[in-house]
Structures are given as C-alpha cells and as structure tokens.
C-alpha cells in the first residue's frame, strides 16, 4: 500500500509539484508568446531573427482591386488585411479599366494602418450633357446630403433651378422666390450661402450693390420663403443658421461687432451672445470660435466660447482677414485659426479638456501647427477627421484620429478666387485652369478629371460615383450657331460597375 509509505508519499508529492511547476512555466511561455504575437512579433524563417510585424487594412471603391507591396503582388483583392514586417512600403491598388492608386507608407512594428479610402478613377471618363440651362449660372450650391443642386442666374435672379442628383434622368426644375418678399425692387444677384440639416431649406443672399438681404428659401414650397432681413428688422445683420436648424439663427451686427442668436418668430436676442467680435466661426448650438481685441499692440486674441465658458487660445498677428474653422469630432470640438500674415495655422483638438486636465496652465497646448506659405483658406473635412490649410499650390494637413500631419506641394494651382470642396472625409476637389481635380487628403493621389466653368466647379453624387460639371454657352457667329450652356454628368465608374 504505497500511499501509506511516507517515502513514496513524499516522492509522489514532489512529482506533482514538479508537474505543476512545468505546467505553469508552459502556460507562462505560451502567454508570453501570445502577447508577443499580439504585438506583431514573429520569427523570420529565412534568417531566424525576431521581427515585429504591422497590420494594414486595405479597401477601395470599387472593390476587387489587386494589391501590390513594393511592386510584389499580394494574395487576394480589396477588401483585405495584410500582416507584414515593419518598414517602408509603396502600396499600389490596380483594377482593369481604372487608373492605378498608389501610396507610400511607413509601417511601424505593432501598428495598424488603414488605407480604406482609395477611390479608383476610370482610365477613360465618359461625359454626357444631360440638361440645357437657360443661361450661364452665376452660382451653384449642393445640399448637405448631395441630393439637391441649386443654380442661380443673372437674368431673372429670383428664379432658381434645381436638380435631383438621385434621379436616373436629369431634369431641371424651377424654384421661384416670391418677388413680394424682397425689400429692394431692383435686380440683384442670388447666392446660396448655407443649407439646413433638413436638406430642403437654405439661406441665400439677394445683393443689389452694397445692399444685402438674407432670404430663407424652402425648395419644396418656395412660396413659404421668408425675408430674414425684413423679419429681424435690421438691414445690417449678417445671418446664418444656428446648429443648421431651419428656424434658429446666429445674427452678426458689424457696427457693434456683436453676435446674437435669433429665431424664426422674428425675435433677436437683446443681449449679445459674444461681443467685440472681429471674425468668427460657429458650430452647433453654442460653439463660437472668434477673434477679438488684445491688450497687446499688433495682436488679437483667438478665443473659443462654449456655453458659459470662454477661453483664450492664443494671440495672433493683426490681419485684414482671419481664417477660422470649427467642427465636432465625436463629442470634442476641433478647430483651426490663422492670421495669414503668419504663414501658418494653429490646430486644436478639444482645448477645453486640455485646460481641465492641466490646471496649472492658462492657455491650451496646440495639437499641431500647419506651415503654409500665404494661406488662402482653412477647411475641415465633411466627417471632421481632417483639417487642411492651403495656398495656391501648397498644402498642410492634420489627421486628428491618427495624430499625423502631412505637407506637400502640387504642380497645379488652385484657381484664384475658388475654394476647395471636401467630398467626404478623405477626398477633396478643386479647379485648376478650369480642370476639375480630385485628391486624397494626404496628397498621395491627384487625378485630373474634366473641364468645368471655373467659378462653378464640380459637384458629386453621394457615393462619388458621378460628377456634375458645367459647359458655358457660346454666342452665335457668322460661321457657327449659338450653343446653349448645359450641365453634364461624368461617370466615375466603368460600365461594368454601374
């Protein structure tokens, strides 16, 4: 009876302890290996060296693109996931009928990079005129959801045209703003400034000389349009939506440099929401990024107000014009400020949180500084993930989520007086010598598309599958007939993918 023998009983206990110990060591080694594998570590089978991998997610529109890393074709097509050693790569995506997409990438060990925004452009673009226009449009504007495209004209300026971009057959429908609501009977110009989030209401200005009236237009029922300038009883007010709501507004009075809130019932706040405002940008219900006087000569204060809190961001040089952008990323405010004479833009991601987390400082630390020669404008992408400062051909961009910045120059220049339009969170478009360009946010791919009237540019369907451009009219001569202006559609998918 071995279990009664003390010596054998002790040996059995030792064997159990050794077994448990070895088992624990095995578990520890396995756990350590799993941790290293989770962090991308692996063994190079050709050299036996320990290396650290990274992970790349790749996708494209349209999908099914072949993937190349440093010229070597990879298995599968987009949508794909590649585990590769840390290092520098040239990533190419190719698909028959489309131009190649390429991006240089520095992949760090244990990191994840997402290249899920590749937009493939057809090698050959098919453009067709789809509708004649009564004359050359002066202005064009698109709703937030990209469904509605509105055009205004010099002749009969209160008669606008609208196109529904989701319809298979393009038809031009008129929108008549009632002449009876206008205070100035003289012929002026109409320009759409801003759309409400219902995508059926927009604010337009009616300009006659130096006189400007702000009109709230209902595209579904133009007869319900209202003259906001008359409604608020002050011809000096500059009006915009508050939180993109069709019945709430911010109203700025230049003579007193005061910013008020107002509602559709005709009431303007008696107490300004912000005072001493030289320039401003609003977002949401109560966020205001603004420039105000400073206690130092030659400088002004850049401040951010949210509700009852009003914080100083920094002081910048006095200029004739200031560039301001403000948006919301998740629940945090993101913003950029620039005095163009400084050749830079300062970017912040939730400066109020920074002050709350760092009680010993009075001014928030900037997220980054974008260096740009002679900046023209500052823009935040449609999804608020990217901010861009740009000059004629030089760009500086910061990606908030990844906390990465990019600077680059292009051979082409943005046409003077034309602004860049974000198409989504990763692509933007601009006019260069009348040619419409599409570019990735990081400057890695720039595609020349087709020509359009410079001051009108191009507009796109919701998924960027097609673009609208404008062809000017031609006056008749002795040798050639007149040609009516028209709007055209260019397909951004090959026939097999439509």
Image (cartoon, grey):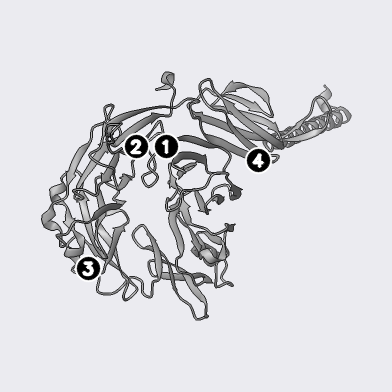
Residue 244 placement, left or right of 25: left
Q: Earlier in the sequence, mark 2 or mark 4?
A: 4
Position above or below: 11 against 315: above
Q: Are dots 2 and 4 in contact, CB under 8 Å?
A: no
Q: Earlier in the sequence, mark 1 or mark 2?
A: 1
Q: Which mark is residue 471?
A: 2
Residue 219 placement, left or right of 243: left
The x, y position of residue 393, in whole percent, is: 55, 49
Q: Which mark is residue 152?
A: none
- Classed neighbour count for the residue bearing mark 1: other residues with Cα under 10 Å, few (<14), some (14–19), many (≥20): some
Report, in whole angstroms, how far the alpha carbon at label 1 lies from the one at label 3. 39 Å
Q: Which dot, 1 or 3, sits closer to the camera? A: 1
Q: Are dots 4 and 3 in contact, CB under 8 Å?
A: no
Q: Which mark is residue 451?
A: 1
The outermost residue toward the front is: 478
Q: Are dots 1 and 2 in contact, CB under 8 Å?
A: yes
Position above or below: 472 against 5: below
Q: Which dot, 3 or 2, sits closer to the camera? A: 2
Q: Please, what secondary structure does the residue beneath circle 2 have?
A: strand
The x, y position of residue 465, in whole percent, is: 40, 30
Q: Earlier in the sequence, mark 4 or mark 3?
A: 4
Report, in whole angstroms, how far the alpha carbon at label 4 lies from the one at label 3. 56 Å
Q: Nearer the viewer, residue 415 or 194?
A: 415
Q: Earlier in the sequence, mark 1 or mark 3?
A: 3
Q: Please, what secondary structure does the residue beneath circle 3 have?
A: loop
- Report which residue position mark 3 lands on: 235
- Report which residue position mark 4 lands on: 111
Q: Nearer the viewer, residue 72 or 27?
A: 72
Report, in whole angstroms, how far the alpha carbon at label 2 lies from the one at label 4. 47 Å
């Amino acid at each position: 009876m071995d279990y009664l023998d003390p010596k054998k009983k002790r040996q059995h206990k030792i064997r159990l302890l050794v077994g448990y110990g070895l088992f624990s060591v095995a578990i520890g080694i396995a756990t350590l290996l799993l941790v290293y594998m989770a962090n991308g570590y692996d063994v190079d089978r050709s050299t036996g060296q320990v290396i650290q991998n990274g992970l790349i997610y790749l996708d494209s529109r349209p999908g099914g693109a072949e993937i190349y890393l440093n010229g070597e074709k990879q298995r599968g097509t987009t949508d794909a996931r590649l585990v590769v050693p840390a290092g520098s790569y040239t990533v190419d995506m190719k698909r028959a009928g489309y131009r190649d997409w390429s991006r240089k990438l520095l992949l760090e060990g244990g990191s994840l990079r997402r290249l899920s925004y590749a937009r493939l452009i057809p090698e050959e673009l098919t453009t067709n005129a789809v509708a004649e226009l009564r004359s050359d449009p002066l202005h064009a504007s698109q709703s937030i959801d990209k469904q509605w495209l509105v055009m205004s004209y010099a002749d009969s300026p209160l008669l606008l045209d609208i196109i529904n971009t989701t319809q298979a057959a393009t038809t031009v429908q008129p929108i008549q703003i009632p002449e009876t609501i206008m205070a100035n009977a003289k012929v002026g110009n109409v320009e759409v400034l801003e759309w409400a989030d219902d995508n059926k209401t927009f604010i337009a200005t009616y300009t006659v000389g130096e006189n400007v009236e702000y009109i709230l237009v209902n595209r579904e029922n133009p007869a319900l349009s209202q003259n906001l300038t008359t409604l608020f009883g002050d011809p000096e007010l500059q009006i915009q939506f508050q939180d993109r709501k069709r019945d709430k507004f911010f109203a700025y009075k230049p003579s007193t440099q005061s910013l008020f809130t107002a509602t559709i019932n005709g009431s303007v706040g008696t107490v300004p929401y912000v005072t001493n405002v030289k320039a401003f940008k609003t977002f949401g219900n109560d966020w205001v990024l603004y420039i105000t006087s400073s206690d130092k000569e030659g400088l002004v204060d850049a401040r951010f107000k949210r509700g009852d809190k009003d914080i100083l961001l920094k002081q910048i040089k006095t200029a004739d014009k200031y560039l301001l952008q403000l948006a919301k990323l998740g629940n945090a405010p993101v913003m950029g400020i620039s005095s163009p004479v400084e050749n830079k833009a300062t970017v912040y991601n939730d400066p109020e949180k920074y002050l709350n987390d760092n009680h010993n400082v009075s001014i928030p630390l900037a997220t980054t500084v974008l260096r740009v020669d002679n900046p023209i404008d500052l823009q935040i992408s449609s999804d608020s993930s990217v901010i861009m400062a740009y000059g004629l051909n030089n760009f500086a961009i910061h990606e908030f989520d990844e906390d990465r910045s990019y600077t680059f120059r292009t051979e082409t220049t943005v046409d003077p007086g034309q602004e860049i339009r974000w198409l989504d969170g990763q692509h933007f478009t601009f006019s260069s010598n009348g040619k419409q360009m599409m570019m990735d946010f990081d400057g890695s791919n720039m595609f020349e598309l087709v020509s359009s009237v410079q001051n009108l540019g191009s507009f796109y369907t919701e998924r960027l599958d097609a673009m609208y451009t404008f062809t000017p009219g031609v006056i008749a001569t002795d040798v050639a007939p007149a040609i009516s202006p028209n709007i055209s559609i260019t397909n951004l998918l090959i026939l097999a993918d439509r």
